[in-house]
Image (tube, grey):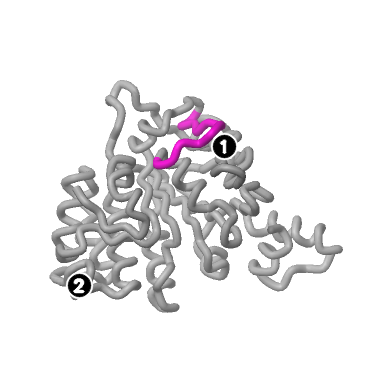
Amino acid sequence: MFLHIRYPALRRRWSLANQVGCSVSAEPKLSAQTAGGAIVRVDGLSKRYGRIRALDEVAFSIGAGEILGLIGPNGAGKTTLFECVAGLEAADQGSVFFGSVPVDGQCRSTKLFYLPDGIAPWGDQPVSWVLDYSLGFFAGRREIYRQVIDDLALAPLMRVPIRALSKGQRKRTLLALGLLAPQPILLIDEPFEGLDLRQSREAAATLRKHLTPDRTFFLSIHQIADAAKVCDRFVLLSGGWVVAVGKLDTLTALARQRGGHSLPADFEEVCLALT
């Protein structure tokens, strides 16, 4: 399989990272009853590129059936964090737990599906072929295929080659690919990038619609206004550090404390105050 990806080194690694890499007997079972309701726990994750500290002792948890948002300025380490959590990139130290069980990177694809930003898989093939092939390749959720197509308004694009799509059309196609993946936890880097206001709202509604107790989304979002509308909780990352974790009201209160008790006007102000 060959993927046309913005970063060529990820072509094969992305496909391999999302294939099931462990035997059934080795799969840890996810349960919201373990680790205080967390189905995934990241503990002490660190990554350096030479002298550059990309991640430093990152720790947080992902709860069952939630939309968790990863927020931070450019260069905060968001994409690196996603790649390390997904097992696409090896962390220098730290662990990722499924429930109470630490899981090696090559085995995380049993429960995690990572959708990077900026990929254009099988560029010469039409949308219908890409989605059908992905369903077979990843053993996806065929039972929701038609619903996902309708939710993301992809019917008029089904015969259009991937390389001929606009940025927004390609993003909607990739969101469909992710929603059809079989894994219960979906990591999406910049799900609203390239979408206009209406499309962003429709995509957010689609994600919320497909959220279930057995389906969880972890989203890296640059558009803070969109994040505030779609996410249940947030991880704020700055300079490779987790500077805050919590719901909007918790983060607002923390920003108010740090800002001399003045109430932030909106979530953008909250993020600016904390990062």
- Residue 274 as seen in the image, left or right of residue 130: right
Relative side of 112 to 35, left or right: left
Which quarter of the picture shows residue 238? bottom right
Residue 84: horizontal and vertical position, in percent? 47, 41
Residue 62 position in % (x across, y down): 52, 43
Determine whether the residue tagged by mark 1 lies in a helix, strand or loop: strand
Numbered circles on residues, count? 2
Q: Quadrant of the C terminus?
A: bottom right
For disc 2, the neighbor class at 10 Å (few under 14, some 14 to 19, many from 20) is: some
Q: Earlier in the sequence, mark 2 or mark 1?
A: 1
| Residue 33 in view in this figure | no
Q: Amino acid at mark 2?
A: Leu
Q: Nearer the viewer, residue 85 or 50?
A: 50
Residue 106 showing in the rendered view? yes
**Left or right: 153 in relation to 223:** left
Q: Please give the range of residues in magenta.
A: 88-99
Q: Is residue 65 part of the magenta span, yes or no?
A: no
Depth order, front residue of 148/7 = 7
Residue at image position (16%, 46%) is 136
The residue drawn where x is 39% and y is 35% is 108
Which disc number belongs to residue 252?
A: none
Q: What type is the residue that disc 1 sits on?
A: Leu
Report how far apart the C-alphas of labels 2 and 1 lie in the structure: 40 Å
Q: Nearer the viewer, mark 2 or mark 1?
A: 1
* Residue 45, numbered circle: 1
Residue 130 left/right relative to 113: left
Please state the horizontal and vertical placement of residue 104, each as a whole percent of the image: 42, 29
Residue 157: give its label: 2
Above or below for 250 versus 227: above
* Residue 94 falls inside the magenta stretch: yes
Q: Residue furthest top?
A: 25
Q: Residue 25, how many percent across, how many down?
A: 30, 21
